[in-house]
Amino acid sequence: MEKITPASNAALIIIDVQKAIDAPYWAALGPRNNPQAEEMLSDLARRWRTSGRPVIFIRHDSTERDSAFRPDKPSHAFKDSLLPAAGDKVIGKQVNSAFIGTTLENHLRKNEIRQLYFAGVKTNNSVEATVRMAGNLGFDSYLVEDACFTFAMRDFAGVIRSAQEVHDMALANLEGEYCQIVTSGAFSL
C-alpha cells in the first residue's frame, strides 16, 4: 500500500462522533458497519496531533425535538473514546453539511488549509454531505473510509440495505468527483 503524507497543515475533520450515535433507533434495521471506526479514528487523531497538524471536531447541535443530538441531552456530548484535546477546534452545525451556517469554510481559508481528511458518522449523511461540499468548494479532500460508519436502511424501493452496502454506496458516490477514498493505515505522519 502506497503511503500518503498529508500537507503539513492538512486538517483532520471528525464529524458527529457523539454519544447520540449510540441511540437504539439508529440500529433498528441492523448493526452498523466498521465496529472498529472509533478506535481507528482515535489512533488517527492522536497521530495527527503528534505531527502538529490541526484536528477539527464537528458537533451536531440538532434542533429536532426527538433527536439524541439535541444540545440539552447528555447524548449530545462527544464519545468518551474520542474527545477534543487542547488546541483542537470544535464547530457546531445544525444541518447535515458542516459548511452550512458554520464558520468551517472561513476557518479553513483564514488558516490556508487546503487539504482535508474526513472521518466520522454517518457515512451516507453528514459525512457525505460535508465531503461533497468540500469538493465543490475546491478543497483537496480525502475520506478515511475505515474511520467512518453508518447503519442499515431501506432503499427507495423499501428493500433493507445492510450498513456495509449503504457505506459502500456513499463511498461510490464520492470517489473521484469529490474526494479520494483512503484508509487509516495509509498515512505517513
Image (spheres, rainbow, N blue to C red):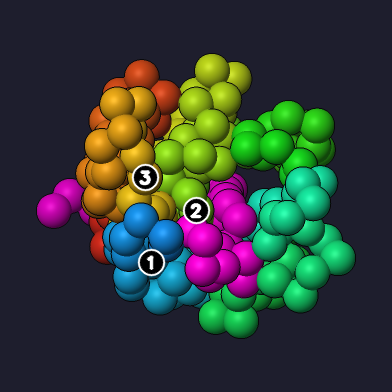
Give the alpha-carbon distance from disc 1 to disc 2, as whole Å: 9 Å
Disc 3 designates what residue?
153
Q: Residue at x 61, y 81 (%)?
A: 80
65 displayed left or right of 119: right
| N-term-proximal mark, 3 vs 1 | 1
Residue 64: where, in percent of width, then height?
77, 47
Which of 102/62 is in front? Answer: 62
Residue at the far bottom: name it: 80
Disc 1 or 2, which lies upstream in sequence?
Answer: 1
Q: Which segment is the magenta one?
A: 1-26
- Looking at marks 3 and 2 on the same chain, the residue that comes earlier in the sequence is marked by 2
- From the viewer's perspective, is 99 left or right of 122? right
The residue carrying mark 2 is 121
Instruction: Tell me residue 147's x, y (percent).
Output: 39, 59
Q: Quadrant of the C terminus?
A: bottom left
Query: What distance separates the C-alpha of mark 3 from that of mark 2?
Result: 14 Å
Q: Nearer the viewer, mark 3 or mark 1?
A: 3
- Quick check: marks 3 and 1 in contact, CB under 8 Å? no
User: Local crowd at mark 1 within 10 Å, few (<14), some, or many (≥20)?
Assistant: many
Dot 3 surroundings within 10 Å: few (below 14), some, or many (20 or more)?
some
Disc number for residue 37? 1
Q: Amino acid at mark 2?
A: Val
Q: Is residue 8 visible?
A: no
Query: Does residue 88 sit above or below 137 in this rendering?
Result: below
Please name the residue shown 86% across and 65% down the image.
72
Q: Secondary structure at mark 2?
A: strand
17 falls in the magenta region:
yes
